[in-house]
Image (cartoon, rainbow, N blue to C red):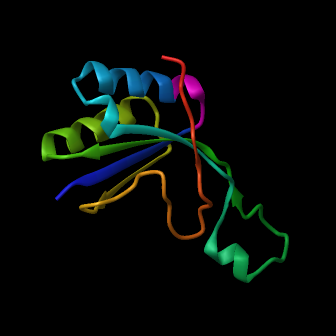
Amino acid sequence: MATVVTGTFEAENQATSAVRKLLRSCVPSERVRTLVSARRRSHYASQRSYGRRNAEQPGGIQVAVNAADNVSKCLAVSVFREHGARDIEQTAAPNVNPTKTSGDVQQGVQYALRL
């Protein structure tokens, strides 16, 4: 079963460095996608809007790796941590399209990084 590993980066240079390292580490380019995530609202904030806190979390550049095996999964997590990913998530799914998101997060747009 494949695993999709995603990491969200604040800056384009962080995401670019992570993608470069993944590609140099023999992860096939067709297994790596980059997305620009829209701003997202927390579930709590959508139920209560008292204006006391900023309920929106900043978007960012999301890099997704479709890891076919455990080695690829561990490599993706390691590279994301090394390059400062804000959020790292792993989703076990056999036929996942990494450009789709779930929950409160809005659909992202595929983003071409300058490599």
* Up-down relation of residue 79 to residue 107 (above or below): above
Name the residue: 37% across, 29% down: 82
Image location (x, y in percent) of residue 57: 66, 55
- The stretch of residues the image draws in magenta is 10-14
Outermost residue toward the right?
Answer: 51
Q: Which residue is at the front of the view, 58 or 64? A: 64
Q: Which residue is at the front of the view, 80 or 1? A: 1
* Up-down relation of residue 108 to residue 112 (above or below): below
Determine the main secondary structure of the stretch shown in magenta. Answer: helix
Image location (x, y in percent) of residue 67: 24, 45
Left or right, 12 with respect to 71, comes to right
Left or right, 19 with respect to 23, comes to right
Outermost residue toward the bottom?
Answer: 47
Residue 106 figure quarter: bottom right
How many numbered tags mark residues here?
Answer: 0
Quarter that holds the N terminus? bottom left
Name the residue: 23% across, 44% down: 73
* Up-down relation of residue 110 to residue 4 (above or below): above
Q: Which residue is at the front of the view, 21 or 94? A: 94
Image location (x, y in percent) of residue 47: 71, 83
Name the residue: 73% across, 64% down: 55
Image location (x, y in percent) of residue 16: 48, 24
Left or right, 78 with respect to 38, comes to left
Name the residue: 64% across, 68% down: 42
